[in-house]
Amino acid sequence: MTDAEFDLLDELYFVSSFNDLAQRTALPPAELDKQLRNLLEQGLVRLYWPDADTELAFEPSSFGAISRDSFYLASKEGLLQHNTQ
C-alpha cells in the first residue's frame, strides 16, 4: 500500500465525496482519480453513486465519467489493511 493510498483510506472511515477528499488530502483531481481507481480495483474502497446511499459496483470503463460525482467509503478489507500497517 502506498502512502497516498494509506492517507486516502484514513479519510474513508465515513462516506466522503470526491470534493471533500480533494480538500482534505490536497491531491490534484487527476491524482485523486488515479488513487481511488487503484483502491477500487483492489477492493479496498466502495463506490456510491448518484448519492451517498446507493452503492454501485466498480466498472473501470465508466468510472472516469462518474468519479468526481461519486462518494467513497473504505471496505472492510480496506479498513483491515489500513489498521494493520
Image: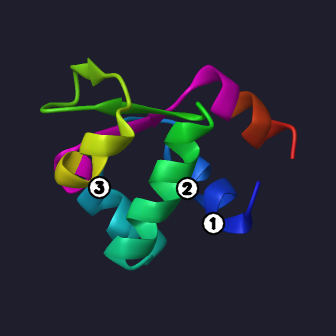
Tell me the CA gap for discs 3 and 1: 15 Å
Q: Local crowd at mark 2 within 10 Å, few (<14), some, or many (≥20)?
A: many
Q: Nearer the viewer, residue 67 or 82?
A: 67
Residue 62 is at least partly visible in this image: yes
Amino acid bearing label 2: Leu
Q: Position of residue 33 (x, y in %)?
A: 39, 62
Residue underneath mark 3: 18
Residue underneath mark 1: 4
Query: Is 59 on the left or on the right of 45, as rendered?
Result: left
CB under 8 Å between discs 3 and 1: no
CB under 8 Å between discs 1 and 2: yes
The residue at 72%/66% (across/down) is 3
Q: Magenta segment range? A: 67-78
The residue at 35%/23% (across/down) is 57
The residue at 38%/31% (across/down) is 58
Tell me how the rendering is colored. Answer: rainbow
Residue 16 is at least partly visible in this image: no
